[in-house]
Amino acid sequence: MNSTINEHKPIGGFHCNKTALIDDFGWFLQVLLACLAFTCLIAKRFCEPKTERRSWLIWFYDTSKQGMGSIAIHLANVFLAGQYTGDPCTWYIINFLLDSSVGLLIIFIGIRLSQHLSKRNGWEAINFGEYGNPPSVNAWLAQCCLYIGLMVIVKTCITLLMQFNFWESVRDLILPPIDNPKIELAFVMLIIPFFVNILMFWVTDNFLMHRSSNATTVRTHIDQNHSRKGGLQYRTVENYRRVSCSETEGLLMDDELLDSEDIPHSPA
């Protein structure tokens, strides 16, 4: 009996068991997190200026890449967290935080590199955010594959980084006051990732979307053109007034000449 109790009792200073991340409550938190993250990306679209707001198709092309990459990274973290010794919840959050910091830097470098190669070699299909006109599904698929490849590089680098021994000390410092396994799981799978994902998804979407460098210039030219048109209209009115005045003066001069011509013919 004691052995049975000990099998279910957390040992080694952790209280999140090996199957906590993939039980019913764990999957519920993961689906809820995915829905909240998706809602964040929808809200971001409506925060864009109306003159630069993406169509729903372009928005889907941009965000679907990030969605597929996030799912791949998340499933890899869930799997790897169960392979370490100790509390899998703390190992998961360590992997997640590294993905959101070091991984974000690797993503940024990879996207900028692909954009540079696209412009230098004319490989339009790998230029993130550019899909042609009309938008091409093939360009979207090529960028999806490239982004998933970046996720593989990110996860490989993070996994190698996790091999250092000092992460054992870091693990012992994470979530020490929490004794309830459900609360710990909620913090690890929902609360902390939600706030980090808001920032990460927002920043990554800015990397992936096409931002026209001429948008501000175009708006400036439009404003200048409106100002110039207003000035031209003002000058046109002034010219009209001047022309009208000159014509009126000319008519007066003609009347005076007629009057002067009529004077000698008037009876004495």
Image: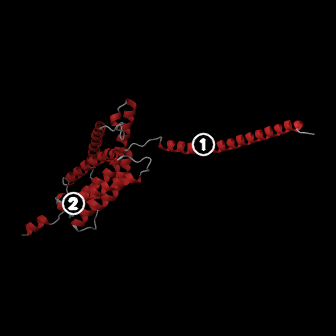
User: Depth check: 17 or 261 in front?
Assistant: 261
Q: Is residue 57 visible?
A: yes
Q: Secondary structure at mark 2?
A: helix
Q: How is the image coloured?
A: secondary structure
User: Residue under circle 2?
Assistant: 28
Q: Earlier in the sequence, mark 1 or mark 2?
A: 2
Q: Tag 1: residue type?
A: Arg
Where residue 156 sits in the image (x, y, percent)? 26, 44
Where residue 4 appears, as percent x and y from the top left, is 8, 66
Q: Furthest residue to the left?
A: 1
Specify the quadrant that holds the N terminus.
bottom left
Of residue 220 and residue 151, the one placed in the foreground of this image is: 220
Furthest-right residue in this view? 268
Give the structural element (helix, strand or loop) at label 1.
helix
Residues tagged 1 and 2 counted as in contact (Cβ below 8 A):
no
Instruction: Name which residue type carries label 2.
Output: Phe
Q: Position of residue 228 (x, y in %)?
A: 60, 42
- The label nearer to you, 1 versus 2, is 1
Crowd around label 1: few <14 · some 14–19 · many ≥20 (10 Å): few
Q: Residue at x 19, y 54 (%)?
A: 82
Label 1 vs label 2: CA separation? Answer: 60 Å
Quarter of the view holding residue 187: bottom left
Give residue 228's mark: 1
- Left or right: 63 as drawn, with respect to 14: right
